[in-house]
Image (cartoon, grey):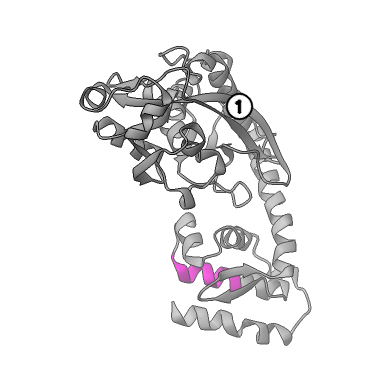
Amino acid sequence: MQRSIKALEKHPIDMQKDSKLDLSRLNWDDLRYFLEVARTQRASGAAKRLGVDYTTVARRVRALEDALGTLLFDKSRSGGFLLTAEGQRLLGFVDSMETTVQSAAEQIANTGHALSGHVRVGSTEGFGCFFLAPQLARFQDAHPNISIDLLPVPHFVSLSKREADIAVTLERPEQGQYVYTKLCEYRLQLYATAEYLEAHPPIRMTDDLRQHRFASYIDDLAFSYELLYLERAVPGAVSRWRSTSVIAQYFAALQGRALAILPCFMASLEARLVPVLPGEIVVTRAFYLSCREDLRKLRRITTVWDYLRAAAEINRGFLMGDTPDMQWPDITAS
C-alpha cells in the first residue's frame, strides 16, 4: 500500500517528461476506477465498491493519468483523493458516459424481456424503515429482476456522488441538474405508552407537559432543521434522553420512561403507543423525491419513481395519521 502511494506521489514529475496524448494507451476500463475514486475520494472506498484491492485502484488511476498525460487527483493522507481542475472536467464526461452506457444496455437487454437492473434508494431513517421497506418489498412482486438497495440513514444521501439513484429527503435537493417533486406530507404527534400515562402526572393541557420528560433529537447533530420541532411544538420541553435516530426515540418511548414526538406512520403501527393531546400537539412535514436529471430517463428508475409516488398517494391518510393501516398500490400498473 505504501509503495503504491509513493508511486502516485511521484507521478506529476513523470508526466512532465511526455505531455503528448496517446489514445492507444488509454484503457477505457480505467475510467470506472477513476469514477469511483472521484465519488468516494478514497482509493480504499473505491476498492470496496469495485470489489478489488487498494493497489489495483492505485495502479489503474496511475495508468489513466499516464495515458492522458495529466494529473487527475491531488493526494493527501488527510483529504484523500481530491480532483484537480483537469480531473473535475474529466468527471463530467465520464459520468455522462456511464449514464449513456447504462441507458443503451437497458434498452437492448430489456427488449422483449422483463425490466431488470439495479436501483439504490436513499431515505431518511424512519420513513425508509417503516414505509419504504415494506412498499419496495411489494414492488419486487411485479419486478423481481430489478434489484433494490434501500439506504435508510439519519443523514443526507448524496446524489452527485451516486450514493443513491433516488433520494427521499426532508428538503428540496441541492442546486444542480436534479429532477424533484413533493412526494407527500406527513404528520407527527406526541405519543406515550399507557403505562407512562398511568405512572405520571395527568396531561390535560399543554401546560401540563412541563412536568414531563421527552425523548428527542440532539440539536447540534440533527442533519436537518426540519427535525428540530420539539421546542417549537412544546415550548420549555425538557429532554433528558436524546438521539440522532428517530427509531431510537421510538424505542425509548416504548419503554414507558418518556414522551416523544413521532411520525404517525411509525407510531400508529404500535398499539402500545397512544396519542397525547391529539389535535393540539401536531407537526406537519413533507418529503421530497429527487433524482439526477440524466438518470431519470432510465426505465428502471422511472418505474421505481412512479411506484413510490403511487404508494405515497394511496397512503395519504396513513401518512397524515388519519387512518391506521398502510395501503398497497396496484403494482401491475406501476
Instruction: Assess disc 1: are there few (<14), some (14-19) or many (≥20) residues with their C-alpha within 10 Å of its C-alpha.
Output: many
- Magenta-tinted stretch: 53-62
Secondary structure at numbered mark 1: strand
- Say whether residue 54 is magenta: yes
Q: Amino acid at mark 1?
A: Leu
Q: Nearer the viewer, residue 211 or 178?
A: 211
- Percent across and percent down for residue 72 are 67, 70
- For image coordinates 61% across by 63% down, the residue present is 34
- For image coordinates 51% across by 19% down, the residue present is 320
Label count reads: 1
- Say whether residue 154 is magenta: no
Answer yes or no: is residue 225 visible.
Answer: yes
132, above or below 37, in the image: above
**From the viewer's perspective, is 19 left or right of 55?**
right
- Quadrant, the C terminus: top right
- Percent across and percent down for residue 331 are 52, 16
- Quadrant, the N terminus: bottom left
Q: Residue furthest front?
A: 207
133, above or below 77, in the image: above
Q: Nearer the viewer, residue 279 or 120?
A: 279
- Image quarter for residue 199? top left
- For image coordinates 36% across by 26% down, the residue present is 191
* Predominant SS along the magenta part: helix
- Percent across and percent down for residue 326 are 43, 16
- For image coordinates 51% across by 74% down, the residue present is 78
**From the viewer's perspective, is 230 left or right of 27?**
left
- Percent across and percent down for residue 36 are 57, 58
Answer yes or no: is residue 121 visible.
Answer: no
Residue on which disc 1 sits: 183
